[in-house]
Image (cartoon, rainbow, N blue to C red):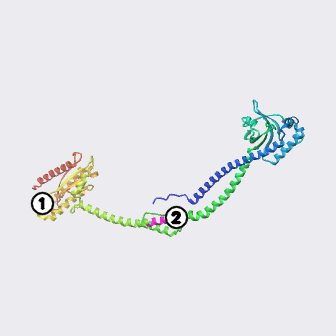
């Protein structure tokens, strides 16, 4: 029986597949959660920025912009506004920058800095901070392209901007109008997107760890207890038994069935159905094997009898060589361009033996003559094609040595015939003739040539021994 193919245990593969599937699902959930959380945080920042800028605008007096620019830190009102803005920034720690700029349109969109908070509030700023008020800020994208909207629209603008110094920022720019409805400045709030991303990642990672821990516990329970009890253990038992099955003999089939039956697996799921199906299949296989063996034995017995009858039908009963039908079949099976020889021999003096000693002696005489020829042409089939006429089909080594064997046969019969002290019924003699395919075109011609040569040999024998 062929060696069983090595299998991979489901008890190992299935938990791995479940774990991989779970990890993929967790990854998908976390990506979706990350994107939703980021959108949520952006929306929260927008609402926060709207509220903060409203408070900034309430405290900012658009009619005092010139004073703010000229006196800045030396003005009590400016310092009070600064202090209030710092308190707003402290109350909203997610705010990265808080400032008021007066945007204007020029060859390069820019803005005049009115208020720009430092790291912490101070009433005695250094000269750099003082000089910073009133200086020009070159607008970056995307606000440079949106300068018309900043100057004319009453709606705030909330966009992501990038700077080499701070990276990506979420900027909220809300217009400030005077009592006539004219644009005078913009209250601006920036949030760090990097911080937002970090916070978002921390949230997602925490959520992922919780999901993985819960999922791992569920998978462990499912794998160790439920999966093993209901699937992998029964499958392993069935697999171990089936891997040892053999199907060479009826005993092997009986062993397979009894071993599987003794497992006594009682499962009300698909494994139980599979087990019952295997059990039925093995029982049916045993039944078929038993019937097959019986039928095979009967067929072999019949074949032997048929072959025996066939052999008898093609065998001469007296000499035990092939009969005329066997000779005809053998001649018809000769292939084109196949080299072969034909020897025809006919018993001499048979009438004298029959008349003097009786037909039983004559039959024995025929058998003796046939045996002499058969012993010499031992590798070629001999056929009795008439009452005392025989044929030999020469192939292989006998064909190669045909001339030598033919002459040996003639010499043998001459020696036996010359043994005058023997009873004439044992002085065997035959007339022989031979032909081969190299000098004849057809098997019919080859047989006729051999028969003509035999007749010539018989005539010479009769002349030599004065036999009519």
Cα–Cα span, label 1 and label 2 = 82 Å
Residue 220 lies left or right of residue 173; in this view the side is left
Magenta span of residues: 273-283
- On the image, numbered disc 1 is attached to which residue? 351
On the image, the x and y values in percent for residue 48 come to 77, 47
On the image, the x and y values in percent for residue 151 come to 76, 35
Q: Residue at horizontal 23%, vertical 47%?
A: 437
Seen as rendered, the residue at the extreme top is 107
Q: Is residue 277 magenta?
A: yes
Query: For the residue carrying disc 2, how many other residues have a C-alpha within 10 Å: few (<14), some (14-19), or many (20+)?
Result: some
Q: Is residue 208 above or below residue 278?
A: above
Q: Which quarter of the picture shows residue 157?
A: top right
Q: Secondary structure at mark 2?
A: helix
On the image, the x and y values in percent for residue 310 come to 26, 61
Query: N-terminal of the two: label 1 or label 2?
Result: 2
Q: Residue 255 or 304: which is nearer the viewer?
A: 255
- On the image, numbered disc 2 is attached to which residue? 238
């Amino acid at each position: 029986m062929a060696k069983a193919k090595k299998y991979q245990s489901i008890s190992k593969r299935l938990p791995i597949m479940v774990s991989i599937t779970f990890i993929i699902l967790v990854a998908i959930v976390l990506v979706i959660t990350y994107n939703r959380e980021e959108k949520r945080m952006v929306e929260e920042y927008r609402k926060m920025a709207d509220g903060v800028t409203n408070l900034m605008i309430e405290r900012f007096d658009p009619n005092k912009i010139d004073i703010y620019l000229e006196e800045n830190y030396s003005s009590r009102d400016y310092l009070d506004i600064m202090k209030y803005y710092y308190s707003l920034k402290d109350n909203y720690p997610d705010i990265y920058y808080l400032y008021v700029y007066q945007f204007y349109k020029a060859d390069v969109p820019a803005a005049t800095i009115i208020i720009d908070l430092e790291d912490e509030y101070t009433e005695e700023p250094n000269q750099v901070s003082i000089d910073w008020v009133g200086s020009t800020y070159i607008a970056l994208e995307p606000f440079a392209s949106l300068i018309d909207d900043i100057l004319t629209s009453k709606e705030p603008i909330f966009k992501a901007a990038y700077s080499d110094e701070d990276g990506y920022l979420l900027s909220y720019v809300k217009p400030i109008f005077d009592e006539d409805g004219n644009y005078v400045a913009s209250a601006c709030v920036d949030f760090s997107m990097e911080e937002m991303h970090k916070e978002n990642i921390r949230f997602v990672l925490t959520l992922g760890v919780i999901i993985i821990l819960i999922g791992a516990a569920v998978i462990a329970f499912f794998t160790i207890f439920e999966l093993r009890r209901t699937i992998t253990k029964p499958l392993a038992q069935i697999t171990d038994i089936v891997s040892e099955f053999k199907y060479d003999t009826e005993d092997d089939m009986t062993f397979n069935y009894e071993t599987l039956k003794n497992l006594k697996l009682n499962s009300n799921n698909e494994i139980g159905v599979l087990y019952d199906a295997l059990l039925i299949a093995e029982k049916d296989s045993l039944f078929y094997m038993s019937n097959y063996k019986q039928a095979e034995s009967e067929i072999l017995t019949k074949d032997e009898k048929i072959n025996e009858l066939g052999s008898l039908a093609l065998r001469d009963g007296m000499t035990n060589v092939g009969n005329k039908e066997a000779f005809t079949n053998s001649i018809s099976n000769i292939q084109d361009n196949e080299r072969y020889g034909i020897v025809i021999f006919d018993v001499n003096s048979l009438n004298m033996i029959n008349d003097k000693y009786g037909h039983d002696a004559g039959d024995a005489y025929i058998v003796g003559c046939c045996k002499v020829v058969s012993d010499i042409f031992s590798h070629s089939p001999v056929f009795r094609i008439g009452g005392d006429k025989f044929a030999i089909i020469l192939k292989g080594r006998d064909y190669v040595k045909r001339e030598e064997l033919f002459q040996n046969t003639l010499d043998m019969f001459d020696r036996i015939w010359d043994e005058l002290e023997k009873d004439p019924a044992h002085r065997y003699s035959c007339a022989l003739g031979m032909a081969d395919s190299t000098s004849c075109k057809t098997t019919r011609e080859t047989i006729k040539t051999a028969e003509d040569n035999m007749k010539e040999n018989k005539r010479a024998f009769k002349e030599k021994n004065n036999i009519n």
